[in-house]
Amino acid sequence: TKINKAPTSQKLLLNMLQRETLPCKDIHNLPRNTTIDTYTRVFQYKCLNSILYLNNTLHKMKLSDTSLCSYCQEKDETIAHLFFDCVKTKKLWKLVQTHLKEYINLPPLSLQSAIHGFLDIPEDDFKLINTIILTFKIPLYNQRNKQKTDTNQIINDIRKQEYIERSICLDNILKKQYHTKNGNVHLQFCLLSI
């Protein structure tokens, strides 16, 4: 018989979220079910497996001068802090909610949803909302060195994500059907009018 051990990243995730169990299969399939963009899928994979290098880890490797958050400079920059606890992140999510409220009702951010996405929302909006949360995290991470990101940057990145996905599926009928089923056509019309 083979001994099956849970991956270390799964234990870290359970510990971070203070949970006994999680629907790990759903969590790890979420990026694949949400987007066809490889960069976004890989980014989420790094988040889930705690291999997204932030100041806390970089400081331990002596590659960063500080372990503090690039935005608030108050606490160690970890995945939980950057994508949920940081004051800047909370403010930006509220602004994105307000900005898109005419088109879609984005749920409040929780530590669990900030790390792995929204698992318990209606199927109609499931893929669209999870595309938005995945895309929301990327500029937060990429703009860390500039210590500057704003609502316009995030909305532009969501627009860019929709354009990338539409471009990927231009020549592939199966991907086009997936893209349309994903809810991104709805997103496209919403964002064109913003």
Image (tube, rainbow, N blue to C red):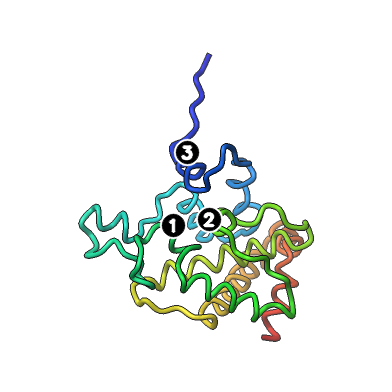
Horizontal arrangement in the rendering, residue 67 relative to residue 118 (left or right): left
Q: Which residue is mark 1?
A: 79
Q: Are marks 1 and 2 in contact (CB under 8 Å)?
A: yes
Instruction: Determine crowd level at label 2: few under 14, some 14-19, many 20+ residues with C-alpha closer than 10 A.
Output: many
Across and down, in percent, residue 150 comes to: 49, 80
Mark 1 and mark 2 lie on one chain; the one further toward the N terminus is: 1
Going by the numbered disc 1, the residue's amino acid type is: Ile
Q: Residue at x 63, y 41 (%)?
A: 23
Q: Which mark is residue 90?
A: none
Q: Which residue is mark 3?
A: 11
Q: Secondary structure at mark 1?
A: helix
Along the viewing direction, whichever of 70 and 29 lies nearer the viewer: 70
Across and down, in percent, residue 123 comes to: 77, 56
Instruction: Determine crowd level at label 1: few under 14, some 14-19, many 20+ residues with C-alpha closer than 10 A.
Output: many
Instruction: Establish if 67 lies above or below 29.
Output: below
Going by the numbered disc 2, the residue's amino acid type is: Ile
Q: Secondary structure at mark 2?
A: helix
Instruction: Establish if 156 lies above or below 84.
Output: below
Instruction: Determine crowd level at label 3: few under 14, some 14-19, many 20+ residues with C-alpha closer than 10 A.
Output: some
Q: Residue furthest bottom?
A: 193
Q: How many marks?
A: 3
Q: Which mark is residue 115?
A: 2
Horizontal arrangement in the rendering, residue 176 relative to residue 141 (left or right): right
Q: Secondary structure at mark 3?
A: helix
Mark 3 and mark 2 lie on one chain; the one further toward the N terminus is: 3
Horizontal arrangement in the rendering, residue 22 relative to residue 85 (left or right): right
Across and down, in percent, residue 94 comes to: 59, 75
